[in-house]
Amino acid sequence: MSTTREGPNPLRPYYKPPSIGIPQDLPGATTNRTHGLGPRSGSAASYASSARDILSDIDYTDYGSPSTVESVKKQIDDWVYRYMSILLAQPFDVAKTILQVRSQVVDDGTVELKSPRQSYRESAYSDYPSDDSDPDEPAYFTSTAPSSHSYSPSRSRRRHDSRSGILPPPKVTPPAKVQLVLKRSDAVLEVISQEWSKEGAWGVWKASNVTFVYGFLLQTLEKWSRGLISALLNVPDPEISAGLIGSTYPWASLAVAAAAAASAGIILAPLDLIRTKLIVTPVSTPKRSLTTQLRALPSYLCPASILLPTLLHSLVTPAISHSTPLLLRSHLSIDPILTPNTYQIAKFFSRTAELFIKLPLETVLRRGQVAVLKEDVEIARAQGTWVSDLETLVPIGEYRGVVGTMWMIAREEGVREPPLLKKKAKPQKGQGLPGLWRGWRVGMWGLVGMWTSRALSGGNGGEF
């Protein structure tokens, strides 16, 4: 029984025919020979037009690929956002790196320990000139006895030069070394203020370009390595399968993510070495461009002395960030959709744990990188290709491996004040655990700011 579109069928009064399809009055849809697709001699344009007429209510804008201009614009916007975020965080990162590599021991081997009142008094009167008189000034308050040093060759030479009309050439003084004199070992703002006063804006935002290039290459290489290892081992990629919880083999996917991060960190270790060198050296050092520093490297492989700290430092972030959603959903029943607030708080605590686990390894890695730079200078001096020494802003602490450096910072290097309850106790040797967590306040500020912005924007789920 045939039905028409003009009115309802009396046998099916509640049936409404669909609005899509080729109308029956079209000439191409009347014969059974063509099955409603028009004449057989029709071109591809007729088929396309009939398809658009049938599915005219569907919007195809979201299904099509974006144009080349839109893709380039989106990529440039992403790069600008990343670079601006690096510029905001770079002063704090520079101060944190300087505090991590700085030694708390004075050059003569003694440990510097000053009371707060003494340090304040020295800082208050350090800008005033000393009472020592200038040796070139005449001595007005002297005894009447003739001085044994009455003859001055410099004065007689000066008179002779003035008579002959020839002035001696001025003395060329070498540029003074830029050194940061820090009163406290954990003052990030003090490092930033001294960098600004002695080196200007270039000192505060040093190594920003290298940091941007390193972050971009690290993310790109990590994603590429993750996809390659997943394809070779036939393991789902955690980025594609909606995290580890959506993967068939979650622990295998976690191992793939950790292996990709470790390989990317080891491959880009020379670039991270250059970044640390640009931060701990003054901006007055010549040849600070990235290409020049890459040519000056003796090898493009990760040095063997810092291979272990580089590996451990690269494994902390993927291990915690990828395993946290798996533990929260499968063991604690905390889901980002059902319990978004609890999920975000749990993610905040996991990022805090990641910060305090990563900072000691980062301190060891930074000291190891400076030790490698010093070894390269010594090797160049032995080979006869020495150009200049490694001039640093602060005295550099010693590097003894991962465990040895941590033990030295906590138990041997510097001193720490006794607790307030024990006023008569002697200062203890070593910096303690706070010496391994230089710059933790900067990391906490970043975490709190990120968590607050997400809470105010009402974001649920996703990556914290």
Image (tube, rainbow, N blue to C red):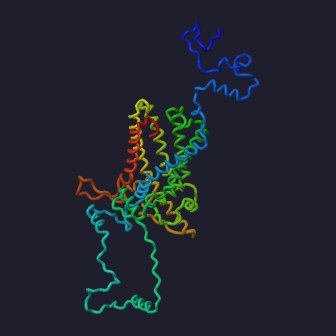
In the rendered structure, the answer to whether residue 252 lies left or right of residue 457 reads: right
In the rendered view, tell whether residue 69 sits above or below residue 297. above
Which quarter of the rendering shows the N terminus?
top right
Q: Residue at x 38, y 47 (%)?
A: 444
Q: Residue 295 location in percent, x, y?
A: 58, 61
Q: Residue at x 43, y 60 (%)?
A: 201
* Residue at far right of view: 41
In the rendered structure, the answer to whether residue 367 lies left or right of residue 421 reads: right
In the rendered view, tell whether residue 228 sits above or below residue 429. above
Q: Residue at x 49, y 46 (%)?
A: 315
In the rendered structure, the answer to whether residue 182 lies left or right of residue 64 reads: left
Which quarter of the rendering shows the C terminus?
top left
In the rendered view, tell whether residue 439 sits above or below residue 153. above
Residue 293 picture quarter? bottom right
In the rendered view, tell whether residue 209 sits above or below residue 456. below
User: Which residue is nearer to you in this view: 141 or 272?
Assistant: 141
